[in-house]
Image (cartoon, grey):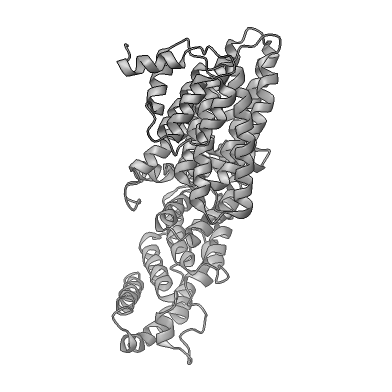
Amino acid sequence: MALEPRLVELAAKLGPSATPDEDPVLNIVTAALDDKEAKWNLEDINAVVLSSEDIQLNALDLCPYLWQHVLENEGATRLLNTISIKASSKECIITLQEIQETLSTNLSLWAQEDQEDEEAGHRLVEKLSFLLQLYSNITPRLVLRKKGPLETLDQLIKGISTALRLGSAAADKGHGRKLLESLSKFIVGVNRWVKASSSASDNEKNDCIDLLATLLLNSLATCGSYIQANIAERYLENHFPRRYLHSSVDSESLQGQEVASLMIESAKELKLRPKSLLKLASQGGGIALACIVLIAHWPIEEYAPELQQLSQLGPQIEFLLQSSSLVDECMFLLMSRANTQGELEVDTLASAVAALASSSPNPVQRNTAFVTLSLLVKKIPPPARLAFFSELLSNENPFPQMRVAAVGLVKESVLEALASPEKNILASNALFGQLGRFLLRPDPLDLFGGRFDPKEFLTSSEPPRLIECLGFYYTLLQRDTSNKTGIRDPSSVSDTRRGLLDPLAGCLDNLQSVADENSGMSVIALQIALERAQDALVNQR
């Protein structure tokens, strides 16, 4: 493509200088940046450099100078990118490693002194992303003579890894995603350069792949939380459409999914696969975190979910949930694996999910956690499940809302057990032997006694809990026609009347007299639930 006449003059000036010590490119670049009335700007210089193969580019001087203006001056950013493509790769690597050391120092200082200045941290992270882009341009152009790629990559990757670790602390979601995008392009490009190297043995190539894999996993350990692709919500929406709160597919989550896809592409380039990641996850720490990110985002059609995978990932997922880390990925793994055939041997995962479903400040996350919990409990063997229900229903449970929700979980399991021809402790007298004190009694037991305070009662979590318990009692009376649970035994009926139904009925008038607009519906719901239970008892005779 022919240059404009004024750029032809610029091209002539950028050519070889008659004076050996003079650098015409640096001089004109300096003028473009410092002189507002300069004849040519950086965009002009970039256009000429791109069009010519004869211009000598002194990367050792140009790169540090242009770096001072990167991102603030679009022309400087473009020209530096062009230099990384056209200048001596050896000179570029040398000067970029110096820039990288300075950038790492600045990131470290920011972490120590300026964390309140988030914008300053974001600018440093943007520069780090651009630095990775420059490395992606340069590294595949390196010409290896006597030494192989491993010696070149070893120090380079150590420096990049340090910078990424520091940069992750200064990033937000957008900048963290950009870091991962730039990293993926760097890894894929460098790995293909290593594969094409004729001077490297197979062992050396494998060592290079291991270096790149470590870089990928360490970076995901620190930046993986920025992906936020809402894969758990998307799974819930697709597989349980009646139980999700609202659509999770938006531009933000789709961007996160694109970043995750780049991470998977990088992992595949480095011969990482889900089965090898499962083994690596057992190491714990940051490596486990990175492996969970990759496994969760690995396409389902390439790695089918199986319940047994949770046995291998369970301790790591439990730890992450307790620390509220990678909740999206953990919920997806739990939900998708629990939605398959099989049985879990332990209920510690369910306990961690129950805590999240009770304590998360995010209503969408609470809903997802509860749906996940309802799937998980069905995979716990009935005896262990009964013990787990006892923990959820107990007044020692620190989350009152879970005591309410747990009644629904019990009902699902009991009705399922009643419908099965196989013997099940959940469809036996043992059910109320262990749970009766929670399901068929008020809390505390003397709640409706002489010191009953109706106002205090209506502002507590007890009304919704009792409404759920009465609803369960009514349903069980209707469904357990064979009296497998002993719900219809005269002694059981008598105890329930004396311990719950009659005392509650005696307090309804007091409740109605103090109810206001907020609590009035609770009183009505209690009355309806009580009357249904009483009618069911009359009809069973």
Residue in front for this viewpoint, 92 or 230? 92
**How many marks are shown on the rendered structure?**
0
Q: Residue 518, image x and y in percent?
A: 32, 78
Quadrant for residue 395, please give it.
Answer: bottom right
Residue 227 appears in view: no
Residue in front for this viewpoint, 377 or 75? 75
Residue most extreme to the front: 19
Quadrant for residue 107, please give it.
Answer: top right
Q: Residue 449, image x and y in percent?
A: 48, 89
Q: Give the residue drawn at x 40%, y 60%.
A: 480
Residue 200 appears in view: yes
Quadrant for residue 526, please give it.
Answer: bottom left
Q: Quadrant of the N terminus?
A: top left
Residue most extreme to the top: 198
Q: Is residue 23 above or below residue 473?
A: above
Q: Residue 64, image x and y in percent?
A: 57, 31
Q: Give the residue drawn at x 51%, y 37%.
A: 127
103 on left or right of 528:
right
87 on left or right of 208:
left
Q: Quadrant of the C terminus?
A: bottom left
Q: Give the residue drawn at x 48%, y 65%.
A: 486
Q: Residue 287, image x and y in percent?
A: 63, 38
Q: Give the residue drawn at x 35%, y 51%.
A: 243
Residue in front for this viewpoint, 205 or 164? 164
99 on left or right of 182:
right
